[in-house]
Amino acid sequence: MKSEDQEEAIAQYLTRRMSEVERSAFEKKISESPQLAQKIEFEKQITQGIKNYKKGILKSRLDQLELGPSIVETTSITTKIILAGITVIVIGGLSYFMLTPDEILVIEKQETMIGTDGITEDKNEKISLEIDTSYLMLIDKKEDEKTPSITKDIENTTVKVTTKQSKKELKSDNVIFQAEVEVVLPDMDETEISFDVAFDSLQDFSDDLIKNQAQINSVTELEVEIEMKKTKKLKYIYVGEKLILIGDFSTSLYQIIEDNMIAEKKLYLYFEQEYYILTKTSEKKVLIPVSDIRLLDYLLDLRNK
Amino acid sequence: MTEQQILDHISRGDETALDYLYKKYYPMMTKMVLKNNGTVEEANDVYQDALIVFWQKAISGDLKITSKISTYLYSICKNCWLKELSRKKRLSYTEQEGSIVQSDPEDIISKVVQDAMEVLGDPCKSVLTYYYFNEMSMSEIAARMNYSNADTVKAKKYKCKKRLDVLIKKNYTQEDFFN
């Protein structure tokens, strides 16, 4: 066999391009020639090396992908505290409501009442938005500074963010959506929180959500309250339209997902890469992560929509 | 994107489909590792490895998928993590025994090949990865790289492989010598 033909045969053998008949004939040859067997052993490693080379390229491609703060766990503590005060509600598995970067900038300017016009993608209906932000007291009062910061004295401070969204001129019922978040921050280290950092992450996150913004098509009013506790176990109480989350929710973002696609409306919580089913309960109930892969898949789709 | 659309994109070698899948299933897959004593880095690593295994199977037409992509990917991920756990266990056992852990000769060759591929540059780099990693046929490579026909690709691949062999032999002897 010519050298070129042999090279080709080895390549075909190692990349499984040979037919069954060719393969067994070639294997017979290998068993008869230790020299050929040795060459194949070496070529096998080169083939693997080429595969690993491409694998390395693909891996570095994946490493560079921006996953966004809602997916990546490792957001900085500075960001986490700010983000923890924001509730995201998904109505009918389709709609998101979020503070937009514009509104955050207004907060930065220390205005207490804001009226902002937003437009939904589907119906071009105007949404009036009011944000009552008593946590502005946390902002460093030095106006000259370009980067206002929350200083160490936020120890045991109560953070209250109330967001209201009402939809006007709707054919059917008015849609009033309200999310109330109350966060009592636990003992903090002497950490100085840069708003720039927090806003950047928030902006990325809200950009992501705005892309997914869709039509509000049901009547929902849910009040979410957080009872901060430095415990590992997460619990909740869900009575009427009030949801109380108990535990350490300061570490990252959470989302409430409301599924209206099925006959009976269902609520889910997404927090730190786990999904939890929320059922009505007047007593404290431990949050147990969803482990059923089919349900996880369904919820994943719901969130991605 | 439907599952079939994703698979179609992969078969065309569209790497944005890889990005899409990575983001879509990131929480689900990494959670499995995190819940089973893995760190965030390990979870990322295992998930990436699993996704690339899936990608390579799909791109080479070697994938006989009967379930949802997520289910299939989940099982690859699980296998990858089990493999990694047993490797770690072996490693800690070897460390306890006090023996010196030596670099795997396969890892050395792999590194030499990777360096040689970089030196080789394009179009050889692409021809060889299309042939060995994507396992594309000569005519598919011809179409992808605008070569006139399969025979041209065959000749090109042979020349590129020869050049790679020369680079590898040169570096491998040096590497060998230093070790």
Image: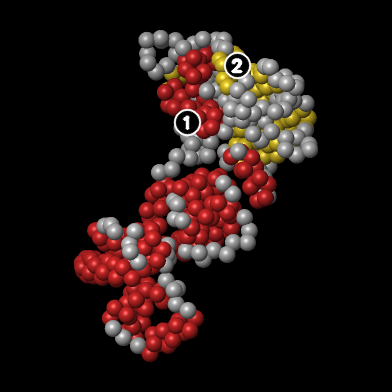
Residue drawn at x 41%, y 52% is A59
Horizontally, residue B104 falls left or right of residue B38, namely: left
The percent coordinates of residue A46 (x first, y second) are 34, 69
Residue drawn at x 41%, y 84% is A26
Q: Which residue is mark 2?
A: A129
* Vertical relation: A216 (above or below) A275: above
Residue drawn at x 44%, y 13% is A140
**Spatial distance from mark 1 to mark 2, Cα to Cα?**
21 Å
Horizontally, residue B66 falls left or right of residue A19, namely: right
Horizontally, residue A134 falls left or right of residue A18, namely: right
Q: Nearer the viewer, residue A42 or B165?
A: B165
Q: Which residue is mark 1?
A: A204
Residue type beneath disc 2: Leu
Task: Assign a secondary structure to mark 1.
Answer: helix
The percent coordinates of residue A185 (x first, y second) are 56, 23
Work out which quarter of the rendered image holds the C terminus of chain A and state it. top right
Residue type beneath disc 1: Asp
The percent coordinates of residue B164 (x first, y second) are 26, 66
For label 1, the crowd category at 10 Å Cα-Cα, with few meaning under 14, some 14 to 19 and many 20 or more, is some
* Vertical relation: A54 (above or below) A100: below
For marks 1 and 2, the one nearer the N-term is: 2
Q: Residue furthest bottom?
A: A32
* Vertical relation: B106 (above or below) A215: below
